[in-house]
Every structure is written in structure tokens, then in C-alpha cells.
Image (tube, rainbow, N blue to C red):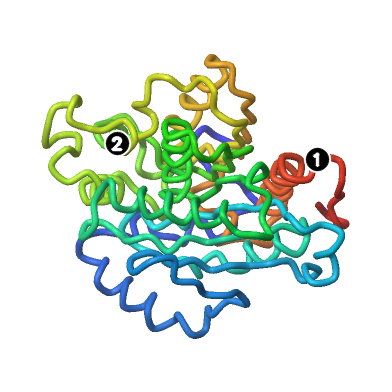
Amino acid sequence: MTEHSFNTQLRAARFLPRTIISARTLPTLRALTKLTARTRRPDAQVVAVNSDVSVLVFRPASASASASARPRTPALLWIHGGGMVLGDAAQDSAFCRRMADELGIVVVSAEYRLAPEHPFPTPLEDCYTALQWLAGQSDVDPARIAIGGESAGGGLAAALTLLAKERGEIRPVLQLLSYPMLDDRTVTRTDVDPRRLRIWSAKSNRFGWRGYLGTAASGGASDGDVPPLAAPARYEDLTGLPPVWIGVGTNDLFHDEDVAYARRLQQAGVATTLHEVPGAYHNFDSIEAGAAISQAFLAARTAALNEALNGAARTHPAGL
């Protein structure tokens, strides 16, 4: 396999576009998201936390039977992707339901407001509101909460962990980050071969960061104007954070920034697992979920989540 070739298990790679989200396509993509909402309706409870934030709550199928024996359950706060400008809490419902049932945990997917209409810090604060709500539930153990997300959601999950550290109210036990969007400075790179990218390109990245950061986006203002909580890779002090699992493909635009962040976490004394997938593109595990490497990716992050929330108390079903 050459440096920029795709993993042979990912057969759809050669047919996929390099860019999906852009200023031109965003209105159509948002309209499609609304149109398909009914077909994606999850098996979950919808809760309005306040007038701006709602959550989808996935409780394990065994919750009622085990309530007396295990009154407080570990939990995962999940944050969806979409480049900060697209997506909804229901898009990862299959994953959330699977984690709830297989690991016996409560999974909450946050519905945060999107950029560019709601730039930083609104989406991050919305996620913090969801985290506070989750930690306050009577059936949730606030000492066993993990924070996770994919892509932009992974970036928000990393930032939310930093914000939780600053505020000192909630202490998550794990960061579960799938190809997280961490560093706005990637938009200035000129050395990335666009031929090896799929789904999320440099063009999409510029659009997403510009919408989230507004006038503080790289190229529009000095680096000092970008708040570290908006771009976690800029955050200086990474000490004292909970363990982190980071998964990313080598053909993902975020690969280098994710590897760099993982190394900085390790240097800061944070227990860090970096799961690299050779020849995998952005969001490969959702697009080609049946591929063996996608199944291995799911198994790896499920194992990390299970260990952090359940320890040796629960084992995976066959295949995980």
C-alpha cells in the first residue's frame, strides 16, 4: 500500500467525493437532515434541558430489571459531528443504542446549536449544559461519566473535557475521540495531498472553522485571537485530564493534528491510546461499517469505553 492509497477493505473510497460540506451545499444538507429526521427517529427519550438545549437519552434495555441492584449507572455523553455546522443528536442513534445495551450504560446525545449562526462558545456551552444535566440524573453515577464524539463532535468533546477541568464541577473518566477536529491551524497547511482525502477536505475545514470561530478564524485574525477552548490543540496545559482514546485514519485530514495532540497528552502524563487505521478516510467506519477494519475500530473504542466505565465488571459480547 503506497503512502496515499486507501485500505483495500474500503471499497467505496474511490467513488466518494472529497468535499461534501461547503457554503454552497450546507442549505441543502440541512434540509435533507430535517427531511430524514423521522426515518432516523431513535429509540430514545427526548428531553428538553432548557429552551436552547435538548438531549436524546438511551437507557439500557436491562435498566428496569437491574435498577434495584445497580441504582446508579455509568454514562456516556455523546456529541455528534458535522463540521460544527451540520448534523443532529439523532444521527448516531445506532451507536448510542448499541453502547447503552451492550455496556449497560446510559448514553446521552447532545443537541447543540450550530455555527455559523451560533459560533463559539455557544455550541461548547450547550454541551456543558447537557453534561451538567447528565451528571445530575438520579440513575447516573456522576463519578463514572465519559465524554465522546466524532469529528467536530470529537473536538467539542476534547474542549468540553478541558472546560470541565477548569470549572471543577464534573470529573469525566474518559475522552472517547473519533477523528476529532482539534486544530484550526490545519486550514493554513499547503502540504496535504487532496487526492488522499474523502468526505472532509481542506475546503470543508476552512468553512467549518470560519463558521465556528467567526472573525477569530486563522487567516482572518492573529493567532492570539483564537480561544484555546475553541481549538483544543492550542490549549497549553493538558495535565490532569482523564485518559483519552483517539482513533483516526492515516488518510484523514485530521490525522496529523490528532497524532500531535495525542503525543502532547502523553507528554503531559495523560494515559493516551492512539488507534491509527492505515489507509482509512474520514468517517470511514460509518460509511463502510461492514468492513473488517471498521468493525475493529468499533471494537477498540467500545473496549476503551467499557474499561473506563465498567472495568472488569462487564465483558463484551462475541465479536467485541
Query: Vertically, is 37 above or below 284?
Result: below
Residue type highlighted by circle 1: Gly
Q: Secondary structure at mark 1?
A: helix
- Whether residue 215 sits left or right of residue 49 in the image: it is left
Query: Vertically, is 91 above or below 17?
Result: below
Residue drawn at x 39%, y 33% as measured from the top left: 232
Q: Earlier in the sequence, mark 2 or mark 1?
A: 2
Residue nearer the viewer, 92 or 312: 312
Structural crowding at the residue carrying mark 2, measured as other residues with C-alpha within 10 Å and reported as few (<14), some (14–19) or many (≥20): many
**Which percent across, then down, holds residue 286?**
57, 60
Structural crowding at the residue carrying mark 1, measured as other residues with C-alpha within 10 Å and reported as few (<14), some (14–19) or many (≥20): few
Q: Nearer the viewer, mark 2 or mark 1?
A: 1
Residue drawn at x 67%, y 47% as measured from the top left: 297
- Whether residue 12 sits left or right of residue 138 in the image: it is left
Residue nearer the viewer, 122 or 132: 132
Residue drawn at x 54%, y 80% as measured from the top left: 41
Residue nearer the viewer, 34 or 268: 268
Query: Vertically, is 255 above or below 139?
Result: above
Q: Which mark is residue 3?
A: none
Q: Secondary structure at mark 2?
A: helix
Residue drawn at x 34%, y 35% as measured from the top left: 229
Residue hosting label 2: 184
Residue type highlighted by circle 2: Asp
Picture quadrant of residue 221:
top left
Residue hosting label 1: 311
**Which percent across, then down, holds residue 168?**
48, 33
Picture quadrant of residue 194:
top left
Query: Vertically, is 1 above or below 259?
Result: below
